[in-house]
Image (tube, grey):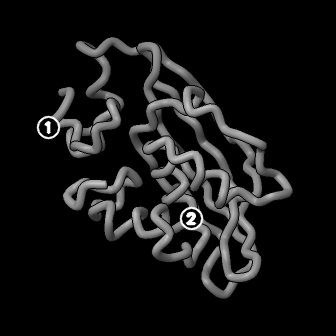
Amino acid sequence: MSDNMLCPCGSGKKMNTCCGIFIEGHELAKTAHELMRSRYTANVLKNIPYLLATWHPDTRPDHINENAIPKWSKLQIIDVEKGMDQDVEGTVEFEATAFSMEKVHTLRENSRFVKEEGAWFYRDGEIKEARSENISKEANINLKIGRNDPCYCGSGKKFKKCCR
């Protein structure tokens, strides 16, 4: 992982001082919010071992097909309830945007997290909205991605310095 790479979670921090510390196993996420952001980043990076390790064993799938993970490009945290260091459960509502097959996909989910033996785990989520819209690079992509958002191609660069 490049020391200069901005974290895909949208925090504006460098990867090695943000979600990278959790994904590489240097620290455990202290809050459900941190785990949510790091799991989003792991999806962007297609880091299957981290996704499985942070998924609660009661609801964790046997495997994740890397090819089924879309090209996530933007994360927006909508709401956080509980999930702080002293809590044992919490929820994080988020909206994430992905691109595939000339479509923009938007997923809004209320994710549930539990803390066991000092570690946060993703338990499950309630999908609030999922939609797909056709896009054309020339006409509409700028409406979906801001110039300073991470590029939809997954490079880790800002959109304005990459595929714009």
User: On the image, which quarter does residue 44 sit in?
Assistant: top left
Residue 38 appears at what percent x and percent y?
50, 59
Above or below: residue 7 compared with residue 155: below
Q: Which kind of residue does numbered mark 1 sit on?
A: Lys
**2 and 1 marks in contact (CB < 8 Å):** no
Q: Residues within 10 Å of mark 1 (few under 14, many from 20)?
A: few
Q: What quarter of the picture does the N terminus occupy?
A: bottom left
Marks counted in the figure total 2
Q: Which residue, given by chain and number where applicable, does mark 2 sit on?
A: 35
Residue 109 got which mark? none
For this view, does 80 lie left or right of residue 71? right
Residue placed at 28% from the left, 44% from the top? 156
Q: Which mark is residue 161?
A: 1
Left or right? Give the position of 93 relative to 144.
right
Tag 1's secondary structure?
helix
**Residue occupying the point 22% across, 43% down:** 158
- Outermost residue, bottom direction? 86
Res. 62 image quadrant: top right
Q: Which is nearer the eye, 137 or 57?
A: 57
Q: Nearer the viewer, residue 108 or 34?
A: 34
Q: Residue furthest right?
A: 58
x and y, in percent, of residue 106 in the image: 53, 33
Q: Would residue 112 appear left or right of 144 to someone viewing this image?
A: right
Q: Residue furthest left?
A: 161
Q: CA distance from mark 2 to mark 1?
A: 28 Å
